[in-house]
Amino acid sequence: MDKKQEFVFSVDHANRKIHVEKEFPAPLDKVWDAFTKEEQLSRWFAPEPWKVESKQLDFNERGRWLFAMVGPEGEKHWSIVDYISIDPMKSYTAKDAFSDDKGNINQDMPQATWHNKFIDQGSSTRYQVDISFDSEEDLDGNLNMGFVEGYTACLNQLADLLA
């Protein structure tokens, strides 16, 4: 079976959450590195033909990732990820937001908290994430910007890299 088909993506409007699960054909350490190391993240975190340009990545509790998604015409959309808690090789929680190139949050755009979990299955790893929003408007705003399609493309790119 094609690993790209083994995918769960659900939206819970009542609780303002998105839930995603995907199995990757790689051991836990490789999947963990793909989510936590800049040189790995930059290879898959933007849906092609977009690219990631990191300005800063400090994967530690209270650390930050400041990056831009760079479009094919050179346009840049900046974001930050603030790391809240990290349980190495098991999980991490982070808050993300759109920002400027200095990391100043754009309060007019949706923000979300990501609860990421990694489950060792021997030769493969199951990734689960619950993405929580402060309001249904933020959830809908995120969905209307193409989050489902974009994140699906990114995770499939990661599956290809790990295969």
Image: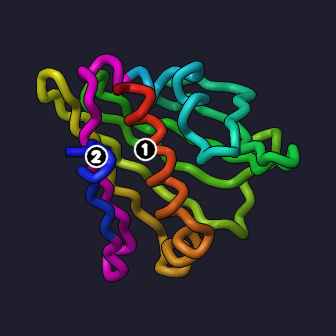
Nearest the eye: 67 or 104: 67
Pointer 1 and pointer 2: residues touching (CB < 8 Å)? yes
Residue receiving disc 1: 155
Q: Position of residue 22 (x, y in %)?
A: 28, 46
Q: Which of 6 and 119 is in front in this view?
A: 6
As drawn, the residue found furthest toward the front would be 1
Mark 1 belongs to which amino acid?
Answer: Leu
Residue found 22% across the figure and 38% down from its top: 126
Residue type, numbered disc 2: Lys
Q: Is mark 2 on a helix, strand or loop?
A: strand
Q: Residue 22 carries which label?
A: 2
**Quarter-wise, where is residue 50 in the image?**
top right
Q: Write down the quadrant of residue 93 in the picture.
A: top left
Q: Quadrant of the C terminus?
A: top left
Mark 1 → mark 2, Cα distance in angstroms: 8 Å
Secondary structure under badge 1?
helix
Q: Residue at x 87, y 48 (%)?
A: 73
How crowded pointer 1 is (Cα within 10 Å; few <14, some 14-19, many 20+) is rated as: many
Magenta segment:
11-32
